[in-house]
Image (cartoon, rainbow, N blue to C red):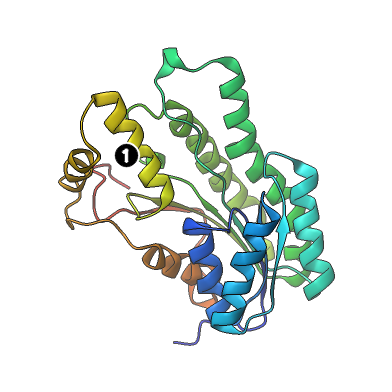
Amino acid sequence: MNLGLTGKRAVVFAASRGLGYACALGLAQEGVKLVIASRDQARIDEAAAKIRAETGADVIGVAADVNTEADIQKVIATCVERHGGLEIALHNAGGPPPGGFEAINDAQWLTAFNQNLMSFVWVSRAALPHMKQSNYGRLLTIASSSIRQPIPNLILSNVMRAGVNAMAKSLAREVAQHNVLVHVVGPGRIGTERIEELDRAQATRSNTSLDQVRQASMSQIPMGRLGEPAEFANFIVFLASEAASYMSGTATLIDGAASNALP
């Protein structure tokens, strides 16, 4: 299948590792020109170099913090300046810290609000004019399986991802006439450093071994394994493509059938 992505221009946030990196690599393999971003210039330069070496794609790295609107604007402006436009924006932000309601203070609530919800607002605001100009837009965001079913001890993530999901659904109807499509994708347990961090926190909290935590978690996944970052990235690439031209406003889980929630 020809996905029609060759020559498209994209920005990918939080792309130095994990799902962001996997998605950037997947887009580059389809001929997309990229600007990728993360907070650490050395790490994002290294990621860009790896993608260039593997795919030959035109990709550069920019240091940017998604908690800052000006940094998000800088990333998108860099893409437009270097590549001549923008069709695809993949919003991605690190998950907020674990904790229940009584353990979370106001500063943590506000940080999570900026990091996860407002950053999506800022990416959307900066990207939409360029997508409308191209009459082609794919505004995608990586959320969490909590968009369907809240996860215990992750109240910050549960609340903020719900807000992202509501915004994406609302925005999809507003911009569909411009061929700008909006999607939320919620990863379940994918083999990334984020999952490693959450497992270690759970092991400490429950006074059990890391292996016990992993085995207990794996037992809740009908497929019996963690997902691969490339499996997640494949779906993002599909949503970014011409092949998904009559889909918008969706919220999809990539979780090995782990969630019991109805769509």
- Local secondary structure at mark 1: helix
Picture quadrant of residue 224: bottom left
Horizontal side, residue 129 vs residue 237: left or right = right
Is residue 152 shown above or below 228? above
Is residue 174 shown above or below 68? below
Query: Is residue 238 among the parts visible in the rendering?
Result: yes
In depth, the one of 198 and 139 nearer the eye is 198
Is residue 103 shown above or below 138? above
Which percent across, then down, holds residue 154? Answer: 40, 30
Query: Is residue 4 among the parts visible in the rendering?
Result: no
Residue shown at 79%/51% (left/top)? 73
Horizontal side, residue 127 vs residue 156: left or right = right
Residue shown at 42%/29% (left/top)? 98
Q: Which residue is mark 1?
A: 199
Which percent across, then down, holds residue 137? Answer: 65, 65
Q: Amino acid at mark 1?
A: Asp
For the N terminus, the image quarter is: bottom left
Residue shown at 41%/41% (left/top)? 147
Residue shown at 58%/41% (left/top)? 167
